[in-house]
Image (cartoon, rainbow, N blue to C red):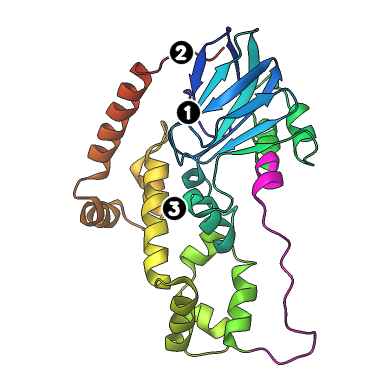
């Protein structure tokens, strides 16, 4: 797997005054193991040393610069939200998909007193850096930083609930994958209201249509699966709800103006060009 693979733990080392550039997309989590450095590109410039964690959402160009006084060793990993379906709820994904709308603005620097930083400091590469156990540990670190407060319904137990109350509860329970494949009519049934009423409530709350959100997620899921090195069209088509490859190809061409295989070729070319532009090799 390449430098930008999601949920893959890396180790890096900078000589005095050297710089390392954060990936330009997705979320990045970085923490020094030894030495001191600075985050350059954010406003303002921030110092970073062992025991602290930098969190970046790709909202600006960000670099790590080692102090002129010594070497800087660090660990880091990246999270690509488009590769994870069936993990986040709608409300969680809306935050993780739109880091530019988060307050306070990114990048963040978590100090040594933050409850999450101790877990980062104790995280080391396993013998198999691509193992499920390693990815699960890294995803746990993400949850420590990005998880919203636990949901508590404002409706007292036993009190009557309207369709909006039921929808709010369901949106805190259903994952994005479940919501993406759930017919709108079924969601309305669970909310005890008519379909038209459900769509109106959703639009009032999120400013967009639920079917439109489902279609957008389907496009993201298809591209994320096609981008995997060992993907095949038949498997991607089935995962996206299409029984036949031809129907999936026709849908994909309508959405992107090209066949899935052509999209894959363009993607591979872009990845190759990006890799050739890398300024340094992570050790």
In the rendered structure, the answer to whether residue 267 lies left or right of residue 210 reads left
Label 1 near label 3: C-beta < 8 Å? no
Residue 228 sits inside the magenta stretch = no
Residue identifier under label 1: 4
Q: Secondary structure at mark 2?
A: loop
Q: CA distance from mark 3 to mark 1?
A: 24 Å
Q: CA distance from mark 3 to mark 2?
A: 37 Å
Count neighbours of disc 1 (C-alpha within 10 A) and say few if under 14, some if 14 to 19, many if 20 or more: many
Q: Main secondary structure of the magenta part?
A: loop
Query: Residue 110 at x, y = what percent?
Result: 69, 37
Query: Residue 281 at x, y = what percent?
Result: 48, 12
In the rendered structure, the answer to whether residue 262 lies left or right of residue 15 reads left
Q: Which quadrant: the C terminus?
A: top right
Q: Secondary structure at mark 3?
A: helix
Earlier in the chain: of badge 1 and badge 2, it is 1
In the rendered structure, the answer to whether residue 129 lies left or right of residue 115 reads left
Give the answer, above or below, for where 261 lies relative to 73. Answer: below
- Residues rendered magenta in the picture: 140-161
Give the answer, above or below, for where 187 lies relative to 256. Answer: below
Q: Secondary structure at mark 1?
A: loop
Q: Residue furthest bottom?
A: 160
Residue 160 sits inside the magenta stretch = yes
Earlier in the chain: of badge 3 and badge 2, it is 3
Q: Quadrant of residue 79?
A: top right
Residue identifier under label 2: 280
Count neighbours of disc 2 (C-alpha within 10 A) and say few if under 14, some if 14 to 19, many if 20 or more: few
Query: Residue 269 at x, y = what percent?
Result: 27, 27
Asked whether residue 9 appears in the rendered view, the answer is no
Residue identifier under label 3: 239
Image depth: mark 1 or mark 2 in front:
2
Q: Quadrant of residue 272?
A: top left
């Amino acid at each position: 797997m390449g430098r930008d693979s999601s949920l893959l733990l890396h180790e890096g080392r900078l000589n005095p005054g050297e710089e390392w550039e954060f990936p330009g997309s997705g979320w990045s989590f970085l923490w020094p193991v030894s030495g001191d450095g600075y985050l350059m590109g954010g406003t303002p410039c921030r110092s970073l040393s062992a025991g602290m964690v930098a969190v970046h959402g790709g909202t600006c160009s960000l670099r790590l610069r080692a102090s002129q006084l010594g070497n800087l060793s660090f660990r880091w990993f990246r999270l690509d939200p488009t590769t994870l379906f069936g993990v986040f709820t709608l409300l969680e994904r809306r935050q993780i998909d739109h880091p530019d709308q988060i307050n306070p603005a990114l990048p963040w620097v978590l100090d040594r007193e933050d409850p999450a930083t101790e877990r980062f400091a104790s995280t080391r590469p396993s013998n198999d850096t691509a193992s499920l156990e390693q990815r699960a540990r890294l995803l746990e670190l993400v949850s420590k930083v990005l998880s919203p407060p636990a949901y508590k319904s404002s409706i007292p137990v036993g009190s009557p609930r309207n369709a909006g109350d039921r929808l709010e509860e369901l949106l805190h329970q259903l994952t994005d994958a479940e919501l993406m494949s759930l017919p709108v009519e079924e969601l309305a049934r669970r909310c005890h209201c008519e379909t038209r009423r459900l769509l109106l409530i959703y639009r009032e709350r999120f400013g967009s249509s639920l079917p439109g959100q489902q279609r957008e997620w389907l496009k993201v899921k298809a591209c994320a699966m096609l981008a995997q090195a060992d993907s095949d069209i038949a498997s991607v088509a089935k995962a996206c709800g299409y029984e036949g490859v031809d129907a999936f190809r026709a849908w994909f061409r309508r959405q992107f103006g090209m066949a899935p295989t052509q999209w894959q070729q363009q993607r591979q070319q872009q990845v190759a060009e990006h890799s050739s532009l890398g300024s340094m090799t992570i050790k």
